[in-house]
Amino acid sequence: MQKTVDDVLTGNLPMRVRSNHALEHATLHVLQQKGIKMRLGGISDIGGFWIYGDIDAEELLEAVKEALKRLSNGENDLAVHPNCGTNIAVGGLAAGSLAWLSMLGTRGKVGKTLRRLPVAVLLSVIGYQLARPYGPKLQEAITTNADVSGLEIIEVIKHDISGHTIHRVSTRLGKQF
């Protein structure tokens, strides 16, 4: 039996990562709305997500709880974040592809390569700009899942690694309604 992309995305493991990714984004939104200005980043996996940044663990836990509640109440827009790696990847792929296309046929020809370089730069900027609206759309459709039904917060643990603070936010999928 051949699986479709939709079959893969809605499987148990991908859905858990996607739900944790949505909760990670929602948490970052909540922290920003509370006036937290420090640089924070995150990465999600099947068991929760990591938050990179020197923030108080209790403050982070409260933000995670609020984020989960707000997502559960239908604030699906919190699942999409402007600083998500999906946005960077989509823009970078478009920019790199157009730059690469503009350089076709220049291999080993330094003069031709140098003459096309401004075109490559221009096309990469255009590609990046044209791709910008697609990053959030891909987040919404593929890399996050705002339906966090049954998702439970287990704990938030602060780790100090070589002078850098990271937090592990552990989740589990409880009973689904």
Image (spheres, rainbow, N blue to C red):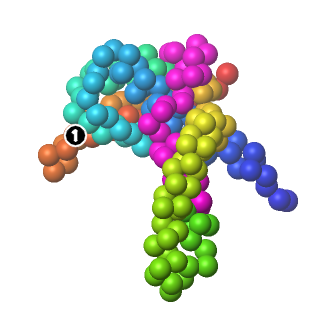
Query: Which quarter of the figure has residue 11?
Result: top right
Residue at the far right: name it. 1
Res. 46 in view: no
Q: In this view, does 45 lie above or below 150?
A: below
Residue 73 among magenta residues: yes
Q: Which residue is disc 1 drawn over?
A: 165
The verdict on residue 14 being magenta is no
**Residue type at tag 1:** Thr
Q: Which residue is drawn at 27% across and 24% down?
A: 37
**Magenta part of the chain:** 69-98
- Dominant secondary-structure state across the stretch colored magenta: helix
Residue located 51% across and 50% down the image:
125
Front in this rendered view, residue 88 or 56: 88
165 sits left or right of 171 in the view: left
**Residue at the bottom extreme?**
108
**Crowding at mark 1 (Cα within 10 Å: few <14, some 14-19, many 20+):** some
Give the image quarter of residue 24.
top left
The x, y position of residue 23, in whole percent, is: 49, 29
Question: 31 left or right of 160?
Answer: right
Q: Quadrant of the N terminus?
A: bottom right
| Residue 43, horizontal then vertical, whole percent | 42, 43
Q: Is mark 1 on a helix, strand or loop?
A: strand
Which part of the image, by quadrant, shows the C terminus? top right
Of residues 91 and 4, the one nearer the viewer is 91
